[in-house]
Image: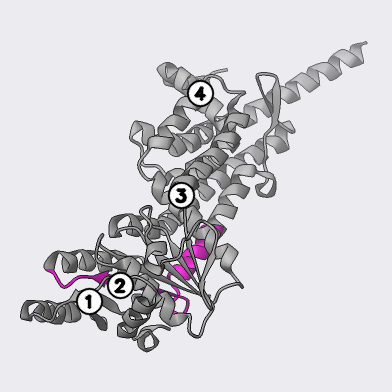
Amino acid sequence: MKFQSVWRLLKDFGGGLRSRSTEYIEFELREMENIFPLLLVGSFVGIPSPPSNISIKLMPYVVREMYVMGRRAGDMDDVAGEVFGLFID
Amino acid sequence: MKVIFVVGKGGVGKTTCAAAVAFAVSKDHNTLIVSLDPAHNLGDVFTTPLSGKAAKVKENLWGLEVDMEGAIKIYLEESSRKLKDMYSYLKAINIEGYLDTIRLSPGIEEYATLEAMQRIISESEGKFEIMVFDTPPTGLTLRVLALPKVSLIWGEKLVKLRKEILSKRLAIEKIEGEKKFVLEGKEFKLSTREEKDEVMQELLSYMKKVGKIEELQTDAKRCMVMPVMNPDRLSLFETRRAFDTLEKLAMPIGAIVVNKFSGKDDENKLITRAESELGRPIRKIPLLEGEPVGMEAIAKFSRYLKVEEWLP
């Protein structure tokens, strides 16, 4: 019983370390996944965009990125919170 | 296969010149002439009804008129179907509204024209030795011809960004294991490798397709632009501007055809000026009495072009 508790503690600790180590990469990844569709549909908001045929061809495959972009737009009022959150436990 | 693009200002006689070039080269080569102009009259020039399927005009010469309205419709329908399938999971994005906007957005005609051109060139590979494109007026044609280069530049940037996304996903996957993304009950596996990433594969295959067109456009042994102008100043100005763009795109330019030349002094002066400014051989087509319509008239017209002297 004791052994199992210690094992679970170590496992949780390992999981915590792993998730800490990827936090920054995940933040960068979210930013890139946000920028990618922004470029594709950017012409709607005045951002330089690739020719529409490239956007139309890629749109069916960027569902995840479009979702991330929508979420990022929703979180825009607390960007500082998100950035500082990376440094606080 | 060799490709000749006949370009020029609206109303200068591009279709007649394209028909004459195609007629001349078809004596020794199996030739296809394609009208990309939304306002077709290639069939009228040959007095042969033409459609979206290649039809025989005479021995060794085939013609077709691309239905541009239809091409745009097909292009948008294909894209809409794929988009609707995927985005049914993402109700927050008003995809119907997006598609309606795309339908009306500037540039769609150019993309559809390029798609049609790509399709015809790839389908004609091995069937025809020479293809002659009768193009829409200069502005639209130059934008279509510039599209492959612009698309390649953007494609390279997007590939670079995508590579970074995939490498970051892979780094996370190595530490935390495979990641999945669930949206409205549908599970998506996040791709981490280029060969399994649909975005990357679509980008690379599109760049390959567009790269082939760009390669063809800039190869002087396989491609030639034949500008057509009238002996007037406006026509010369437009041809000069077209030259600038074509040179930026590194497209080989052949002889310049000056159509409807009546032999007046002013016109002779303008032709001398055009010759020195543009630095290309000039073929003068006299102002003919009757309309150059029908095989006989086109045969006569084609003799003035002296195609064998300037075609690679």
Q: Which amino acid does label 4 sit on?
A: Ile
Mark pair 2, 3: CA separation: 31 Å
Closer-to-camera residue (B64/A19):
B64
Identify residue for label 1: B288
Mark pair 4, 2: CA separation: 55 Å
Q: Is residue B223 covered in magenta?
A: yes
Inspect this view and state whether residue B250 appears: no
Q: What residue type is labelled 3?
A: Ala
Find the magenta span and give its range.
B209-232
Are marks 2 and 3 in one subunit? yes
Are marks 4 and 2 in one subunit? yes
Identify residue for label 2: B292
Few, some or many C-alpha atoms within 10 Å of disc 1 (few <14, some 14-19, many ≥20)? few
Quarter of the image holding residue A18? top right
Closer-to-camera residue (A6/B95):
B95
Which mark is first along the chain, 2 or 4? 4
Foreground mark, 4 or 1?
Answer: 1
Mark pair 1, 3: CA separation: 36 Å
Q: Mark 1 lies on which chain?
A: B
Q: Which amino acid does label 2 sit on?
A: Pro
Which residue: 45% across, 65% down? B48
Closer-to-camera residue (B209/B128):
B128
Which mark is first along the chain, 3 or 4? 4
Identify residue for label 3: B112
Kindly indicate whether the residue at mark 1 contacts the one at mark 4 (C-beta within 8 angstroms).
no
Identify residue for label 4: B93
